[in-house]
Image (cartoon, rainbow, N blue to C red):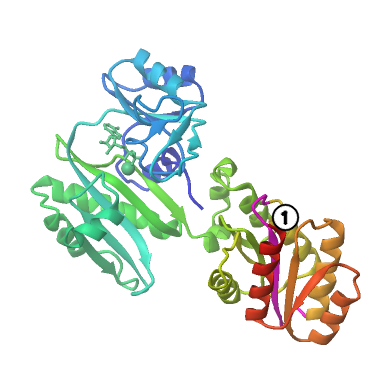
Amino acid sequence: MNIHEYQAKELLRRYGVAVLDGHVAWTPEEAEAAAKKLPGPVYVVKSQIHAGGRGAGRFADDPNGKGGVRVVKSVEDVKAAATAMIGHTLVTKQTGAQGKVVSRVYVEDGCDIKRELYLGLLVDRATSRITVMASTEGGMEIEEVAEHQPEKILKVAVDPASGLSGFHCRKLAFGLGLTGKQVGSFTKFVTALYGAFLELDCAIVEINPLVVTGAGEIVALDAKISFDDNALFRHKDLEALRDDSEMDPKELEAVKNDLNYVALDGEIGCMVNGAGLAMATMDIIKLYGSSPANFLDVGGTATADRVTEAFRIITSDANVKAILVNIFGGIAKCDMIATGVVQAAKNLTLKVPLVVRLEGTNVALGKQILAESGLAIIPADNLADAAEKVVNAVKKAA
Ligand code: ADP
Ligand code: MG
């Protein structure tokens, strides 16, 4: 789960991470009131969307205008900037061409920036440790730095048993060229951030840019947090930070029904049990010359109701031209899956071809249920057969 910058900063502030003063505003009037609470005379108005690159982004209705992060010098200009942002669609490198509608802005104290650095914490699967990454190339996308100047990225992996130590912080601080009191400020910052990362079960925390101020303080100017969804049950209060409007509606439905669903832009809707089989199914669809409209893992405990829900989500996608059900019946028996498929196909009056490949426990009974359903279900015997049949069904329908 991702959250907005202003929410991330509020959380980080509680853990002692240095952030500037600021207030969220849903209307230009609220933005004006927010600015009056800040010392001034420099304010920054920041569009709040779940995507980076806002500063360099442009508004769809004003492509030659200013970006989604604006530095202004009066309360009136704060209001004007908020008016230009709220309710308007911001297009950045990360939003895709359709952009995202800004529903709120963050009005923040202006910062005296001396240097812009990068700091990121993530769980590195290769070492099974939290890795702290830092770079002098702040403000840029770290993926680009990694590709073109990998030597500019400093990394330390933290042993979970002993935790983050002063030497980790000093190693990064000296690598970044920090001096004097900046080193202490950096150590305090990273230590607090690491504490927040652990406590909140984060997957990624990215501070880009991390700033050295004119006074030599280290401050977070931007903050991005992604939580580990598997640990969210331990943080009921964080659920309230979820912004449903930032999610694909189909993905939102899936979360509510405990389905692992990722929307993609292909034409074949996939319903599969098990993540590995789902990946293999997507691969083989590609191999046969088409592309998947989604990744969907109905899980090991696929029931008739979940199958129906999965069908509802798949068929709500206008790009879907055919559906491939590929289920390996283990605990979820094939006859039960077949019953669910038939029930869903009848309830939803499917308008696209449906190919079903079943294998495993009670497969004969499952196939019999499909055959006797009176529905135009195309049965398949194995993965390759299923992929070929579903791709052909799309071609035939076109
Ligand atoms: P994004 O990464 O989405 O473009 P940032 O929050 O990183 O958004 O802001 C973009 C740039 O705007 C920063 O690199 C920084 O130069 C400037 N900026 C952001 N917040 C402030 C602030 N409070 N004071 C001064 N400049 C800021
Ligand atoms: Mg940024």
Disc 1 secondary structure class: helix
Q: Is residue 286 left or right of residue 220?
A: right
> In the image, is residue 64 above or below residue 16?
above
Tell which of 348 and 387 is nearer to you.
387
At horizontal 37% and vertical 20% (from top left) the residue drawn is 35
Answer with the quarter of the image where residue 287 lies. Answer: bottom right
Q: Residue 41: x and y, percent?
A: 26, 18
At horizontal 26% and vertical 49% (from top left) the residue drawn is 189
Q: Which residues are magenta?
A: 317-333
Q: Is residue 261 left or right of residue 145?
A: right
Q: Residue 95: x and y, percent?
A: 45, 43
What is the crowding at mark 1: few (fewer than 14 residues within 10 Å), some, or many (at least 20)? many
In the image, residue 381 lies in the stretch drawn in magenta: no
Quadrant of the frame with the C terminus:
bottom right
Which residue matches tag 1?
Answer: 315
In the image, residue 330 lies in the stretch drawn in magenta: yes
Tell which of 236 and 394 is nearer to you.
394
Q: Is residue 298 visible?
A: no
Q: Residue 49: x and y, percent?
A: 46, 39
Q: Residue 107: x and y, percent?
A: 38, 27
Q: Is residue 52 left or right of residue 119?
A: right
At horizontal 23% and vertical 64% (from top left) the residue drawn is 155
Tell which of 333 and 327 is nearer to you.
327
Q: How many marks?
A: 1
> In the image, is residue 142 above or below residue 48?
below
Q: Which quadrant contains ligand 1?
A: top left
Q: Tell me the amino acid under the disc marked 1.
A: Thr
> In the image, is residue 200 above or below residue 66?
below
Q: Is residue 109 left or right of residue 236?
A: left
At horizontal 37% and vertical 13% (from top left) the residue drawn is 76
